[in-house]
Amino acid sequence: MPDMHRHRPVATTEITRAQPAHYVHRAMRMGKSPDQQDAPRRDAGFAIGTKYGIILFMRHYLCQSAEDRYNAATAPDFQLTTAPRSTMKNSNLNAETIQVRDIGARLHAYRVGRGLSPEDLAAQLGISRAALYRAEKGEIFKIDTLTKITSVLDVSLPSLLGIGMEYVDTAVAFFERMRQLEEESEQIIGFFGPISYLLTSPAYDEMLKEVLRDSDADDKATTDAVEKLLEILKQRKAAYQQRRPLLVNLIASSDLERFLLHGLIGRHDLPDEIQTRRRVLAKQETLHILELLRVQPIGVQICIIPQTVPSTTFQIFRQSTRSVLAISPFRLGEQPNVRVGVGFITSSAEAISLHENIAKRLWEQSLKGNDAADYLIKLIEKYGVE
């Protein structure tokens, strides 16, 4: 498995000078830093004053007591990233990092997840469509706009700013966030069954489209959400095939067994002929996995884990400036779930380190290459439909 602890040069801008609370609030209202209240705003991207205002606002927002507020006014501030720094190790970072461009990406994902058009959200926020477009590009923000966004989209301010843990309660928003993260990733480590969606065949897309419509729910909101999800998944696969980041896929043997036994189904009360056809399609997709194991495409590493595996799925995105962990309750395999759950996304050094250790242990215990291919042939013979 590729080295998980690469290093790159570090270049950051740190905010270290503390200011009294009343001065902080004045600067925040003005959208400028306490040190640079007369600095002009930048038209493209965040003005440095706006960055300061958001960060100082967040520190005030998170304070719960007078003592906390005093500490917030006198302690070192968050760290702003202005140039690439090391993705590995995240444990080298001693301060929270706000990636301002990501705020716009999260805004876009949450809007899509709520099924709102740009015009609808702009109207509810009381801003123009052009202003919302700039906001989703991670450009100009105002503090009052941020608070309105959290209210309209029903998300917390820390989640919107990416501080601590980001919580995502719709599959559409979660997979859109994954698409965004994958577009900037140099390496992806995925424990997602029965196989990483990025490696699935075109036939799998057609099968998944049919399966996601198995539900009895036929309301317009559900139908629209499924269509949007399929569009996002298509974009994810197209972006991966164009960029070809390194991909490590950890596959649980138990996921493959259930996939072969039941096929890709949304519920178990389907007519027998449909269930049989789904099992045939599942066998064909498993043969596609077998071919990947035999050919071993450049930049793709696949293993099969016959031992007990974690019950949750996760993905680690290694980017040029950081690493990000996504933990998903949503499934695209046997008995897919795209309707209920809360996904977690974080750049926490501890969370990433723990999951990288899990991935490393699973990789070391797994079957690879010809051993994995031979093992998969036996699973197909045992569980695959005739």
Image: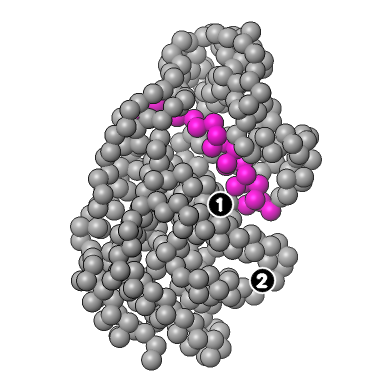
State yes or no: discs 1 and 2 in contact (Cβ < 8 Å).
no
Q: Nearer the viewer, mark 1 or mark 2?
A: 1
Look at the image and say whether residue 352 sits in the magenta stretch: no
Residue visible at 77% across and 34% down in the picture? 127
Reading the image, the residue beneath label 1 is 176
Whether residue 308 can be seen here? no
| Residue 129 percent across, percent down from the top left | 76, 39
Q: Secondary structure at mark 2?
A: loop
Looking at the rendered structure, the number of numbered marks drawn on it comes to 2
Q: Classify 10 Å Cα crowding around label 1: few (below 14), some (14-19), many (20 and above).
A: many
Q: Secondary structure at mark 1?
A: helix
| Residue 303 percent across, percent down from the top left | 28, 64
Q: What's the residue type where badge 2 is placed?
A: Ala
Q: Nearer the viewer, residue 26 or 319?
A: 319
Q: Classify 10 Å Cα crowding around label 2: few (below 14), some (14-19), many (20 and above).
A: few
Q: How far apart are the two marked residues, 1 and 2, measured between alpha carbons?
A: 23 Å
| Residue 141 percent across, percent down from the top left | 65, 28
What's the coloring here? one colour
Residue visible at 45% across and 51% down in the picture? 243
Nearer-N-terminus badge (1/2) = 1
Residue visible at 73% across and 65% down in the picture? 220
Q: Name the mark on residue 129.
A: none
Prevailing SS of the magenta stretch: helix
Q: Is residue 85 above or below residue 367?
A: above
Q: Is residue 314 above or below residue 384?
A: above
Please provide the residue range marked out in magenta: 93-115
Look at the image and say whether residue 104 sits in the magenta stretch: yes
| Picture quarter with the C terminus | bottom left
Reading the image, the residue beneath label 2 is 217
**Image position of 46 (left or right of 190):** right
Q: Quadrant of residue 209?
A: bottom right
Q: What's the residue type where badge 1 is placed?
A: Glu
